[in-house]
Image (cartoon, coloured by chain):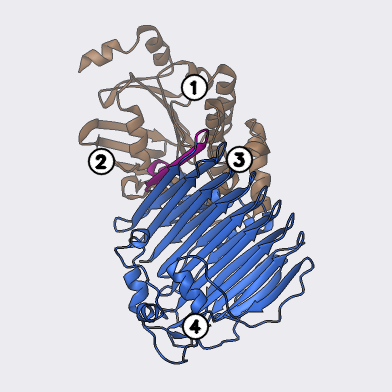
């Protein structure tokens, strides 16, 4: 039995008065990994921000249900606490806030929402160090302010660490491969794959097929002009890699 | 000292006038952002004595308790220092509030630092208004002898009637002799209708070093003014400050740094956070005399503005009369970074909690410049 986790129906959204997402429909069931591929400017990142509730991204019509609840009625932090997580394309640097402090606040905010006791400093550090080690993140990096002076690869590893410790039910990977060399890509992909447990779902947004060699999707969708124009299995990604997006862009 | 009659409410401006002292008006350039009208609006009586003392600091120190402008504890025996009580002083400058301070001095201390002190000296000022709008004038004459070193911490707190609009007028005359160093820290958390005017006059001889940090979180009108004369080669001053205010207060940080000799160095970093209808003022002047070559003077003021009605007034002034100097000033103000806020919220952290973390980080950046780690941790616990 497929249990729907995320149900997007006829979603329309705009940024600065410009309509970017147009009649978008997609259902993701528990345990499924979907990939969305598409040309630059199709609105892929906009979709991820709309799902996270970023201010400035306005939904004009349609609905999104997450675990049966109205996702669009929730604040940014409520969505995160319910289990929506976005690996950002360009994570911001936050000078002055040590990474561990930030992670502890985040973990405990989510645990509190789930009715779990907050972790004390020792429990938290033990957990974050263990997860960090798997991603090649050492104590020095954890002491530094969030993302400050991190390389592109380090930032993506930090995003993956945040996901690993927050354990969301649904993760969106927005161009998780951008700015990564092949070794860093493998580390991030391994981190993501460790979280694939048959229940957790993912939406992988990417330009290139390369990432999908490491994070193998159940479904691939072509996204152009604000909505899905074609869906298929992982072979569709290979086809796109060969033929490009030209035929879909023309379709409109 | 000129005698004041207890229990008489004095109009402060009138008292100054009959004493031949001209207080600044809202039109006086150096005071026009300070909302003096509020400060001078209320008649003040001379503070009645109190024996209540301020909260202890979480660090090992020699402590002197000052309550309602009077010494309330026995002076500690500090190895390497000599401390005596004074009840009259001469004011050498034309600073009107310092002149008032001298003429109507409540009490003060003469502190002589002879060598390196093993722990900080805390001046714990406490106010318990007892239902009156009192005023007091306190002065420290601090002499750091050749090659001595000391840390002095001033804390200003209150208890009882929060709505009292008392006035604290403070002056520190600090003389740092050759090779001596002084770390001077201040925490101002006066009652929210109170007024606080402080002047620090500092002269620094060759290779002398002055490091200061002032955190202002209280009062209605508060001005922390620092005047530094770098009088010998190798003299150095660090004048850092932070202020945080959410009500309607005016928090003023004014600095005048005079480089009189070559190879002198100064730096200033001031960060403020204002919300509500609060107002932050920064007036910073660096003056470099004609012969003061190979000097360096830097100044940076940054402010975070949390509401539409909060205000920041910044007036940097550089007066450079010498060649071969390195001087810079900068000012920036802005809101909480929206991208940073979104990032934190997207990880489940509530909006208010995220804002608090970002504001703490903003101010901690200045606090991190404090060299003494226990003082640094104390200030971090105050924001």
C-alpha gap between disc 2 and disc 3: 62 Å
Tell me if B181 is positioned left or right of A98 in this view.
Answer: right
Whether B339 is among the magenta residues is yes
- Residue B117 x, y percent position in the rendering: 75, 62
Chain on which label 4 sits? B
Q: Which residue is mark 3?
A: B263
Q: Which residue is mark 1?
A: A179
Tell me if A48 is positioned left or right of B153 in this view.
Answer: left
Q: Which residue is mark 2?
A: A59
- Residue A5 x, y percent position in the rendering: 41, 40
- Circles 2 and 4 on the same subunit: no
For the residue labelled by badge 3, is the local secondary structure a helix, a strand or a loop? loop
Of all residues, the one furthest to the front in this rendering is: B291
Q: Residue at x 27, y 37 (%)?
A: A9
Q: Is B382 above or below relative to A89?
A: below
Look at the numbered discs 3 and 4 and tell me whether their residues touch, using CB distance below 8 Å: no
- Circles 2 and 1 on the same subunit: yes
What is chain A's hue in the picture? brown
Could you say which is closer to the camera, residue B22 or residue A219? B22
C-alpha gap between disc 1 and disc 4: 59 Å
Could you say which is closer to the camera, residue B311 or residue B198? B198
**Disc nearer the start of the sequence (2/1):** 2
- Residue B200 x, y percent position in the rendering: 54, 62
Look at the numbered discs 1 and 4 and tell me whether their residues touch, using CB distance below 8 Å: no
Mark closer to the observer (3, 4): 3
Q: Which residue is mark 4?
A: B160
Dot 3, crowdedness within 10 Å: few (<14), some or many (≥20)? many
Q: Is B87 above or below relative to A69?
A: below
Whether A249 is among the magenta residues is no
Chain in blue in the render: B
Start-end of magenta stretch? B323-343
**Disc nearer the start of the sequence (3/4):** 4
């Amino acid at each position: 039995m497929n249990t729907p986790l995320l149900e997007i129906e006829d979603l329309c959204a705009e940024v600065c008065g410009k309509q970017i997402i147009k009649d978008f429909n997609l259902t993701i069931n528990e345990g499924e990994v979907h990939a969305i591929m598409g040309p630059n400017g199709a609105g892929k990142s906009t979709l991820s921000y709309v799902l996270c509730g970023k201010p400035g991204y306005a939904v004009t019509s349609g609905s999104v249900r997450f675990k049966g609840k109205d996702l669009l009625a929730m604040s940014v932090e409520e969505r995160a606490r319910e289990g929506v997580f976005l690996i950002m394309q360009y994570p911001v640097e936050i000078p002055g806030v040590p990474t561990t402090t930030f992670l502890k606040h985040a973990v405990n905010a989510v645990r509190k929402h789930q009715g779990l006791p907050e972790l004390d400093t020792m429990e938290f550090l033990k957990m974050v160090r263990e997860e960090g080690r798997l991603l090649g993140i050492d104590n020095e990096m954890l002491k530094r302010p969030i993302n400050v002076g991190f390389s592109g690869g380090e930032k993506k590893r930090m995003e993956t660490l945040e996901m690993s410790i927050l354990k969301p039910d649904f993760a969106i990977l927005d161009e998780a491969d951008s700015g990564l060399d092949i070794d860093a890509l493998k580390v991030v992909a391994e981190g993501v794959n460790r979280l694939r447990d048959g229940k957790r779902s993912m939406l992988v947004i990417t330009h290139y097929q390369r990432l999908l060699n490491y994070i193998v999707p159940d479904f691939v969708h072509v996204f152009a002009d604000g909505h899905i124009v074609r869906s298929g299995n992982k072979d569709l990604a290979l086809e796109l890699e060969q033929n490009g997006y030209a035929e879909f862009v023309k379709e409109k | 000292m000129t005698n004041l009659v207890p229990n008489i409410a004095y109009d402060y401006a009138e008292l100054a006038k009959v004493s031949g002292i001209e207080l600044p008006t809202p039109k006086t350039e150096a005071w026009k952002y300070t909302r003096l009208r509020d400060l001078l609006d209320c008649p003040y009586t001379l503070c009645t004595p109190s024996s209540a003392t301020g909260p202890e600091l979480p660090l090992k120190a020699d402590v002197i308790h000052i309550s309602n402008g009077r010494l309330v504890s026995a002076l500690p025996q500090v190895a390497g220092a000599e401390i005596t009580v004074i009840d009259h002083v001469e004011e050498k400058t034309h600073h009107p509030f310092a002149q008032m301070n001298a003429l109507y001095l409540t009490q003060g201390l003469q502190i002589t630092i002879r060598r390196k002190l093993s722990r900080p000296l805390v001046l714990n000022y406490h106010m318990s208004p007892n239902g009156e709008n009192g005023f007091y004038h306190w002065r420290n004459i601090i002499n750091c002898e050749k090659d001595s070193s000391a840390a002095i911490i001033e804390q200003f707190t209150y208890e009882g009637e929060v709505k009292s609009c008392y006035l604290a007028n403070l002056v520190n005359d600090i003389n740092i002799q050759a090779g001596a160093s002084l770390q001077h820290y201040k925490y101002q958390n006066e009652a929210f209708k109170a007024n606080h005017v402080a002047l620090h006059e500092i002269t620094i001889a060759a290779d002398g070093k002055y490091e200061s940090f002032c955190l202002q979180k209280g009062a209605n009108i508060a001005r922390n003014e620092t005047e530094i004369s770098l009088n010998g080669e190798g003299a150095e001053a660090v004048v850092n400050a932070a202020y945080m205010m959410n009500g309607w207060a005016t928090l003023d940080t004014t600095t005048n740094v005079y480089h009189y000799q070559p190879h002198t160095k100064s730096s200033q970093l001031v960060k403020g956070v204002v919300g509500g209808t609060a107002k932050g003022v920064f007036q910073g002047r660096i003056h470099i005399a004609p012969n003061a070559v190979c000097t360096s003077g830097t100044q940076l003021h940054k402010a975070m503005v949390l509401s539409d009605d909060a205000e920041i007034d910044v007036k940097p002034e550089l007066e450079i009369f010498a060649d071969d100097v390195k001087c810079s000033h900068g000012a920036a103000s802005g809101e909480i970074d929206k991208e940073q806020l979104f990032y934190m919220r997207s990880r489940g952290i509530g909006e208010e909690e995220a804002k608090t973390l970002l504001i703490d980080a903003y101010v901690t950046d200045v606090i991190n410049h404090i060299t003494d780690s226990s003082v640094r941790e104390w200030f971090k616990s105050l924001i």
